[in-house]
Amino acid sequence: MEKRKIQIFDTSLRDGEQVPGCKLNTKEKVSIARKLEFLGVDVIEAGFPTSSPGDYKSVQEISKSISKTVVCALSRAIEKDIEIASLSLKNAKRPRIHTGIGTSDCHIRYKFNSTPEKIIERAIHAVKYAKKFVEDVEFYAEDAGRTENEFLAKVCETVIKCGATVINIPDTTGYCLPEEYGNKIRFLKENVKGIHKIILSTHCHNDLGLATANSLAGIMNGAEQVECTINGIGERAGNTSLEEIVMIIKQNNHLNFFTDINTKLISSTSCLVSKYTGMKVQANKAIVGVNAFSHSSGIHQDGVIKKRETYESINPEDVGICESSIILTARSGRSALAYRYKKLGYFFNKNFLDSVYSIFLEYADKKKEITDIELKIILDKVNLKHKKNNQILHSHSRNDRRINVI
Ligand code: KIV
Ligand code: ZN
């Protein structure tokens, strides 16, 4: 069976940036956008130009610097927003306007004090208006996660008739369970006339930690695009994280999906986004956390040293990390200790390793992690002890020279 391409729509610079404490200047946004283009994303959502002059400028500059990737600007279903979005995209080689409106009862009643009929009218007008400026118009049905499927289908069918090229089904509040979200996508695929002419997109928030699972359910039920952010940054608990969905697709060949992402650039992109946004990545974050390829318990370390796959299902090289780390703590065993000394150029026989290990444990019980410098201090201490006892040496340097003369 032929593999199906999943488009990666990165919204780190729009949904990702709209969080407390995260502020990027135009220069930083342009560098991130360039990196995203190298990474191979299909669409870069560059900002919400109507929101501030700074955001307008950023979308403008990104539009000038990006050559192949679609550059997208967000707008509400308001003429002025759409005009500003189109102006900011003037220099984009492949511009897209992303416009839309809330479709759930809650949004219709409380946010807009409106009716479903009037919301459909506004959706029609927004898409038709955006089409005057660009060919590629994406429509979002905000809070689609809590929108009744029949009404959502009606909205989708209407905007397709108006020329929408992509329809985004956001689970804005991270409300859905994967099965529910998958069924929603399937329902739209099976019940909306013209749905096969457009790209159906997922946009899942992580309020219950289900953003990636929901996006996966979405593509497994027919969606062709995933909206996501680097490191999963975004409103409240964040968005689907790009690295997770991309690596799920890569690791699971049987799903028959592919993306155009160069996964070897994932780690460096994650670092760049974290550095510029000031948003630290949690240590145990899948794929990009510092602990994602680190092993600290003796049993795991021993397994990984013998064969990496015993405790790793992803090859760190696939995401741009040269190798897994063996972290030395009081939980580490002799094989991890020998492995780390070997990396420093020291080779020990069994007796010598036993001596080093007992001193190592004294240090490790007092400290969280033992560094290379401390390994050298430990070695000096063992050598001194042996010298006092007038024992012969059993450690060798990498080129088999005897070291630590006693
Ligand atoms: O979460 C959401 O609904 C959004 C839309 C504005 C696309 O970010
Ligand atoms: Zn969102």
Image (spheres, rainbow, N blue to C red):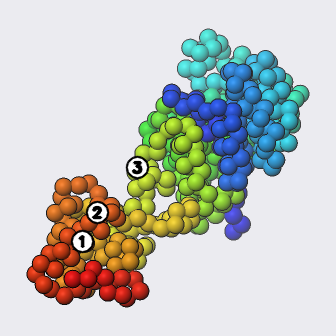
Q: How crowded is mark 1: few (under 14 residues within 10 Å), some or many (20 or more)?
A: some
Rendered location of residue 204, percent (x, y):
56, 39
Tell which circle, 2 or 1, labels the residue nearer the N-terminal end: 2
Q: How crowded is mark 2: few (under 14 residues within 10 Å), some or many (20 or more)?
A: some
Q: With 360 as the anchor, is 84 left or right in this view?
A: right
Numbered label attached to residue 283? 3
In the figure, residue 399 lies in which quadrant? bottom left
Q: Which of marks 2 and 1 is in front?
A: 1
Residue identified by numbered label 1? 380
Rendered location of residue 351, percent (x, y):
19, 84
Q: With 295 as the anchor, is 192 left or right in this view?
A: right
- The answer to which of 223 and 67 lies nearer the viewer is 67
Q: Given the current orientation, which residue lies at the most extreme top position? A: 113
Q: Which residue is drawn at 79% across and 38% down?
A: 63
Residue identified by numbered label 2? 374
In the figure, residue 62 lies in which quadrant? top right
User: Residues under labels 3 and 1: Cα distance?
Assistant: 32 Å
Q: Which residue is drawn at 71% across and 40% down?
A: 30
Answer whether residue 184 is visible to the viewer in this image: no
Tell which circle, 3 or 1, labels the residue nearer the N-terminal end: 3
Amino acid carrying mark 1 in the image:
Asp
Amino acid carrying mark 2 in the image:
Glu
Answer whether residue 42 is visible to the viewer in this image: yes
Q: How crowded is mark 3: few (under 14 residues within 10 Å), some or many (20 or more)?
A: few
Disc 3 on helix, strand or loop? loop
